[in-house]
Image (cartoon, coloured by chain):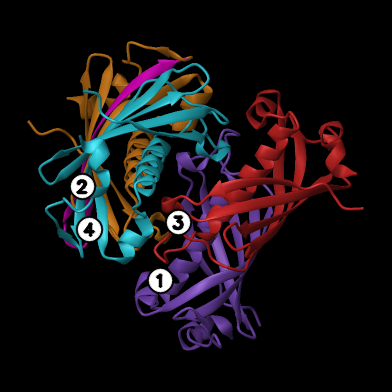
Chain colours: A red, B orange, C cyan, D purple
Amino acid sequence: MEKKIFETEIKVRDYECDAQGIVNNANYQHYYEITRHEFLESIGISFSDSHDEGIDPVVSRIEIFYKAPLKGGDRIISSMTVKRKGARIIFNQTIKRKSDNTLCSTATVDVVILINGVLSIGDRYDEAMKEYLE
Amino acid sequence: MEKKIFETEIKVRDYECDAQGIVNNANYQHYYEITRHEFLESIGISFSDSHDEGIDPVVSRIEIFYKAPLKGGDRIISSMTVKRKGARIIFNQTIKRKSDNTLCSTATVDVVILINGVLSIGDRYDEAMKEYLE
Amino acid sequence: MEKKIFETEIKVRDYECDAQGIVNNANYQHYYEITRHEFLESIGISFSDSHDEGIDPVVSRIEIFYKAPLKGGDRIISSMTVKRKGARIIFNQTIKRKSDNTLCSTATVDVVILINGVLSIGDRYDEAMKEYLE
Amino acid sequence: MEKKIFETEIKVRDYECDAQGIVNNANYQHYYEITRHEFLESIGISFSDSHDEGIDPVVSRIEIFYKAPLKGGDRIISSMTVKRKGARIIFNQTIKRKSDNTLCSTATVDVVILINGVLSIGDRYDEAMKEYLE
């Protein structure tokens, strides 16, 4: 059975490119973060409200592959699936250029949940993410 | 009588340049902010501790002139003086390229002090800034 | 007669907030830049293609007023009008929070056109901007 | 035999923190990039000159572990070693908080060399990096 996919569209901003004329590597991490936060919002979890309640999802590990460059004005489709592995929530993410469907980058992101700064069992979001975890 | 000048050296980071190959305009605002925070630290005020105590200096207005571009690896000398005008603390700031003393940018920055989110009379830092306000 | 207004919607990204929990000042400059580039694109001018042809619009002065803070997830309406003043193209820009129409920031941005690094008379874009300059 | 280590000191800038009050994940990638570029400069290779000559080192993969958070004003010691693996140059990097030597993050970064946009055999920098590759 296929995992349920969340996706969002992002347009590359000119200032996100560096002197090489292509999107700077660190900005992919922003795109990946935006996508996870949009996902959370889509299932009813606000990142900033969570923080105010003392619940902070924190990235413990990220692995990014860079496959094709992006330029200012490019539209990208950023997709993700999510699964559980013990206390970790694992996001598999991809970025494709919209115009020609080129795979530009993939990433695996491990997230843990801190409650008031303490590592939690991590099931805090499971109910909300149910449809995606199956 | 001359105002006392605070200055700090900053090295341009390659990722701060955009596709034009020069430092993106918004990053000058970062350089100006870094300089003010270094200044506050030099007179014993920590920006993050202040925030934890409910005291937030907030920029109400900034005017920046861009005169000459900066490139990756350039070293800059960022200088400032400070004065009071009613509830506002006004910073006059300049950025010069170190190698040839070229004036690259000037700025005027108006800051007000919020205490627990409320505009304060703004004399909170006057004792600490005494030497510079004279 | 009223100037023609260009506007675009932007959603605040969580990473654009700083430790004060609100959008960092420098990011407003990004929002203003995004808006101008979207405007240029809407009238058929690509910022990155322009650069490849040796034509670079460059900000010579920016003045920003900060009136009300923005938080992660806020949607903003970013509006602008444009006029000419000699060699300068002057953008009057505003940022309003969409949910309650609060005016969060205003800016005046002076842009000059460099052709192969040399200040041009600046009429390069006038035909394309015709509708907005009237 | 121990690899030769390059290290540089970086001070966390307040704007690099996000609403969680700690350095945003993407900024670690900036710290790691700054360190590699400082390293290149220390062995006589300028990142921006390289680009002008058509030689672009490009990150093909990055893996980052986040172990302890950083706050505004923290000083960090960013260290790296470098080795070759076929066409790839592999950087092993760490970030430690200076005040108490806490290991905050580690990273492995695979870089390939493009010459005029084409993947090169990648030995372009070997002579310059000789001391570090042994």
Q: Which residue is mark 3?
A: A72
Q: Which residue is mark 1?
A: D47
Residue B67 drawn at (x, y percent):
18, 50
| Residue ID at (16%, 51%) | C122
**In the image, is A3 to the left or to the right of D10?**
right
Few, some or many residues within 10 Å of mark 2 (<14, 14–19, 20+): some
**In the image, is C69 to the left or to the right of A92?**
left
Disc 3 sits on a residue from what chain? Answer: A
Residue type at mark 2 is Asp
Marks 4/2: CA distance?
38 Å
| Residue ID at (51%, 62%) | D33
Residue type at mark 3 is Gly
Few, some or many residues within 10 Å of mark 4 (<14, 14–19, 20+): some
Residue B98 drawn at (x, y percent):
22, 58
Q: Which residue is mark 4?
A: B98
Q: Secondary structure at mark 3?
A: loop
Disc 1 sits on a residue from what chain? Answer: D
Few, some or many residues within 10 Å of mark 1 (<14, 14–19, 20+): many
Marks 2/1: CA distance?
37 Å
Residue B80 visible in the picture: no
In the rendered image, the quadrant that contains the C terminus of chain D is bottom right
First to last magenta residue range: B95-115
Q: Which residue is mark 2?
A: C126
Residue type at mark 1 is Phe
Q: Nearer the viewer, mark 2 or mark 3?
A: 2
Q: Secondary structure at mark 2?
A: helix
Residue type at mark 4 is Lys
**In the image, is A94 to the left or to the right of D16?**
right
Marks 1/3: CA distance?
21 Å
